[in-house]
C-alpha cells in the first residue's frame, strides 16, 4: 500500500512561550534603569503578540497533525483486505468515513469537513481521504484574523484477489507406480525385484486369498506409490482453494490425466467435489504401448484446453496456471526394451511448449517427481543413464531438472519424497498467486 504521512516537527508548546514572555517582563519591571518604562512599552506589546501567535500556531499544527493521521487511517481502512469479507465500494467508503470520524479529535472548537472516495481499476483499489478544517485563533483577532483554514489528504491502494483458473495435468503412466519414497521402493524391491508396482494383470503374488500383480501386492501391503501421494497433494490444493473461495469464489480447478492419451477427468469448475470424485484411481497398465508417457504428443491439446490467460479482473479474463505433475521423462512405450532405436526417445520432455504458453499468458508449474537413483537397473542405464542428448555434461536424467526449471522458474518444485509431493501443489499455487515486488 502507498500512502502519505504528514508528520509535523515538534515545536515548543504555547505554555512554554507564555512562561518565556512572563520572565522577560519581570526582568524589565525589576530593572532600576531610568528608561524602564520606555523600554517596557516598546517591547511588551510585540513580545505578547509573538507569544500569542506561537500559541495560535501550535493550535493549528496540532489540529493538522490529528487530521492528517485521521486521513491516513481512513484511507487504509477503506482498502483493507479483511479475510472472509468482500465489501462493495460503498461499504468501503462508509468504513473509511467512520474511521476518519473516530480519529479526528481536533479540539479547540475547531470544525472540519471531510470526504472519502474509493475507486477500482481492474484489480487495484484506491482510496483518497481529504479534509478542510477551520481553527479559531486567540491572538490572531488582534490583527483581524479570527481563524485559519487548513487542509490535507491521504491516499492508499491495495490489490484485490484475482480470478484464477488452475489446470492440473497429471502423469498417469506406468512410471507413476514407482514407490513414493526410498522405503517404499526398498519394500517393493525385496518382494518383487522391481521398484515399480506394475499393474499388468499378471498373477505372480498370493494376496488375501487370490493371485495378483505387483500393483495389487503394493496396495494390499500399504506401500505408497507416487500417484497416491500426488492425489493427496491435489487434495491439499483443494483445501486451500476452498478457503480462498469464501465468501466470493474466484478459484476454479480442472483435472486432466495423460499417458498415451490426454484424458479430461474434470472440467474447469468451482465444484471441487467433481475433482475429488475423479482422481486417477490407478496408473495405466504396463504393456508394450499402453502405460507410456506421451507428453510431447498431448501438450498441444492441453494448452488448447487451457486457452488464453487474462488479468484476473473477471472470471472471463481469469489468470491461467497449468500445473504438470510428472517425472519429466517422455516414454514412447515399453517396446524400447527390444526395439533399440526407440531408447533415444526415453528422454526429458520437450519444453519448447513453454514459449507457446507464455505467448498465451499461461503460467506453467512443474511438480517434478524425479526418478530416484537406480544405477542397478539395466533399463535405467540403457535410457536415462545414457549421456545427455542436449549438450549437457551429464546423463539424460541430469537434463530433466534444469530444463523443467528453465520452463517454470519459481513455479518449478522438485518433490522427491512423500511430504514434498503432498506440499508441492499448494506451494506452486502460492508462488503464483502471491504478490511480487516489481520495482
Image (cartoon, rainbow, N blue to C red):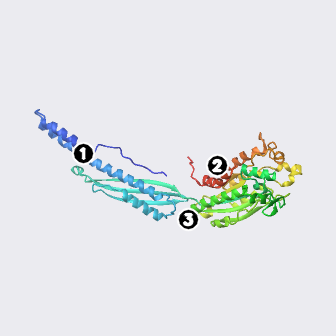
**Which circle's residue, 2 or 1, is located before the other in the chain?**
1
Which residue is disc 3 drawn over? Answer: 248
Please give the label number shown on residue 247: none
Measuring from the top left, give residue 68's x and y in whole percent. 38, 52
First of labels 3, 2 by sequence position: 3
The secondary structure type at the circle numbered 3 is loop
Q: Where's residue 175, x and y in %?
A: 77, 54
Q: Which residue is mark 1?
A: 15
Residue drawn at the location 45% of the way across and 55% of the way down: 76
Picture quadrant of residue 36: top left
> In the rendered view, does 310 fall on the left or right side of 158?
right
Viewer-proximal residue, 303 or 142? 303
The quadrant holding residue 206 is bottom right
Contact between marks 3 and 1 (CB within 8 A): the answer is no
The one of 130 and 426 positioned closer to us in this rendering: 426
Look at the image and tell me whether residue 50 can be seen. no
Q: Residue 347 in the image: state x and y as whole percent.
A: 79, 49
Distance from Cα at disc 3 to Cα at disc 1: 56 Å
Q: Are marks 3 and 2 in contact (CB under 8 Å)?
A: no
Which residue has dot 2 on it?
410
Amino acid at each position: 500500500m502507498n500512502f502519505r504521512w504528514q508528520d509535523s516537527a515538534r515545536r515548543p508548546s504555547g505554555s512554554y512561550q507564555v512562561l518565556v514572555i512572563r520572565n522577560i517582563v519581570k526582568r524589565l519591571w525589576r530593572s532600576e534603569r531610568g528608561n524602564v518604562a520606555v523600554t517596557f512599552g516598546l517591547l511588551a506589546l510585540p513580545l505578547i503578540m509573538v507569544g500569542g501567535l506561537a500559541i495560535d500556531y501550535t493550535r493549528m499544527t496540532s489540529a493538522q497533525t490529528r487530521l492528517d493521521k485521521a486521513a491516513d487511517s481512513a484511507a487504509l481502512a477503506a482498502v483493507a483486505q479483511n479475510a472472509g469479507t468482500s465489501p462493495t465500494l460503498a461499504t468501503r467508503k462508509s468504513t473509511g468515513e467512520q474511521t476518519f470520524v473516530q480519529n479526528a479529535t481536533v479540539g479547540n472548537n475547531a470544525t472540519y469537513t471531510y470526504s472519502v472516495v474509493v475507486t477500482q481499476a481492474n484489480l487495484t483499489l484506491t482510496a483518497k481521504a481529504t479534509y478542510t478544517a477551520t481553527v479559531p485563533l486567540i491572538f490572531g483577532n488582534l490583527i483581524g484574523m479570527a481563524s485559519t483554514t487548513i487542509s490535507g489528504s491521504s491516499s492508499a491502494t491495495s490489490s484485490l484477489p484475482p480470478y484464477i483458473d488452475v489446470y492440473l495435468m497429471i502423469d498417469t503412466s506406468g512410471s507413476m507406480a514407482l514407490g513414493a519414497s526410498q522405503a517404499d521402493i526398498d519394500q517393493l524391491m525385496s518382494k518383487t525385484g522391481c521398484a515399480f508396482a506394475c499393474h499388468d494383470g499378471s498373477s505372480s503374488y498370493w494376496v488375501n486369498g487370490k493371485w495378483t500383480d505387483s500393483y495389487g501386492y503394493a496396495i494390499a501391503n500399504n506401500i505408497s506409490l507416487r500417484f497416491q501421494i500426488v492425489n493427496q497433494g491435489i487434495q491439499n490444493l483443494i483445501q486451500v482453494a476452498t478457503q480462498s473461495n469464501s465468501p466470493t469464489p474466484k478459484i476454479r480447478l480442472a483435472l486432466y490425466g495423460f499417458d498415451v492419451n490426454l484424458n479430461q477427468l474434470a472440467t474447469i469448475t468451482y465444484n471441487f467435489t467433481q475433482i475429488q470424485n475423479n482422481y486417477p484411481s490407478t496408473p495405466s497398465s504396463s504393456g508394450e504401448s499402453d502405460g507410456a508417457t506421451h507428453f510431447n504428443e498431448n501438450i498441444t491439446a492441453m494448452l488448447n484446453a487451457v486457452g488464453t490467460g487474462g488479468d484476473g479482473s473477471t472470471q472471463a479474463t481469469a489468470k491461467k496456471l497449468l500445473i504438470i505433475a510428472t517425472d519429466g521423462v517422455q516414454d514412447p512405450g515399453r517396446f524400447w526394451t527390444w526395439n533399440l532405436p526407440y531408447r533415444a526417445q526415453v528422454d526429458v520432455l520437450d519444453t519448447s511448449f513453454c514459449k507457446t504458453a507464455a505467448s498465451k499468458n499461461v503460467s506453467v508449474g512443474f511438480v517434478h517427481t524425479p526418478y530416484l537413483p537406480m544405477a542397478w537397473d539395466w533399463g535405467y542405464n540403457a535410457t536415462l543413464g545414457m549421456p545427455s542428448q542436449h549438450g549437457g555434461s551429464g546423463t539424460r536424467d541430469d537434463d530433466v531438472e534444469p530444463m523443467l526449471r528453465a520452463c517454470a522458474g519459481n513455479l518449478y518444485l522438485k518433490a522427491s519424497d512423500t511430504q514434498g509431493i503432498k506440499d508441492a501443489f499448494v506451494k506452486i499455487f502460492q508462488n503464483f498467486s502471491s504478490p511480487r515486488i516489481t520495482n
